[in-house]
Amino acid sequence: MKSKIVALSKNEDFKNLLKKKKLSNKYITIFFGSLEDKDNKKLNISFVTKKKQIRGAVKRNKIKRRLRNIVNEAVKKKSINFNYSYLVIAKITMLNNEYTIIKDCLFQDFKKIK
């Protein structure tokens, strides 16, 4: 099955999303909004882990893998709005907590966005 998730690639897209709506919890901050020339059949989402905040590439990549996996499950359950583009910025608290707790928290946030 072809993936429906596409990463943001243009610097302009990142800057535009940072000016749009924001939703935050203790694990992540989500910036979301609609961008022009976006395909509504695919989900535009990017994951960011700050290098100064989270030291070590292994830790940063672990967080991004967790986020990617959670978003894949959310796409399968159709709990994400495909009309928006998303920028997900991870916080250091993601490393210290269990996957299921983080997943439940993020699913609640994605339901709020609808």
Image (cartoon, rainbow, N blue to C red):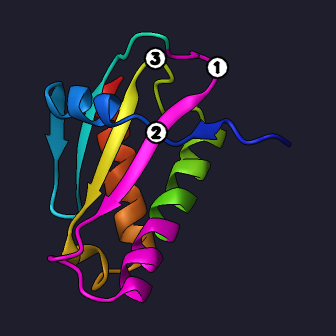
Residue at 31% across, 82% down? 95
Residue 79 in view in this figure: no
Above or below 18: residue 101 = below
Q: Does dot 2 land on a helix, a strand or a loop? A: loop
Label 3 to label 1: alpha-carbon separation: 9 Å
Label for residue 83? Answer: 3
Q: Nearer the viewer, mark 3 or mark 2?
A: 2
* Image quadrant containing the N terminus: top right
Residue 32 appears in the picture as rendered: yes
Residue 9 belongs to the span the image colors magenta: no
| Residue for point 25% across, 43% down | 30
Side of 106 relative to 71 (left or right): left
Q: Amino acid at mark 3?
A: Asn
Q: Which mark is residue 9?
A: 2
Q: In the rendered image of this protein, does residue 47 appear above or below residue 44?
A: below
Question: Which residue is drawn at the image coordinates 15% and 77% (left, top)?
Answer: 52
Identity of the residue furthest to the front in this view: 11
The residue tagged 1 is 41
Residue type, numbered disc 1: Lys
Task: Identify residue type, mark 2.
Answer: Ser
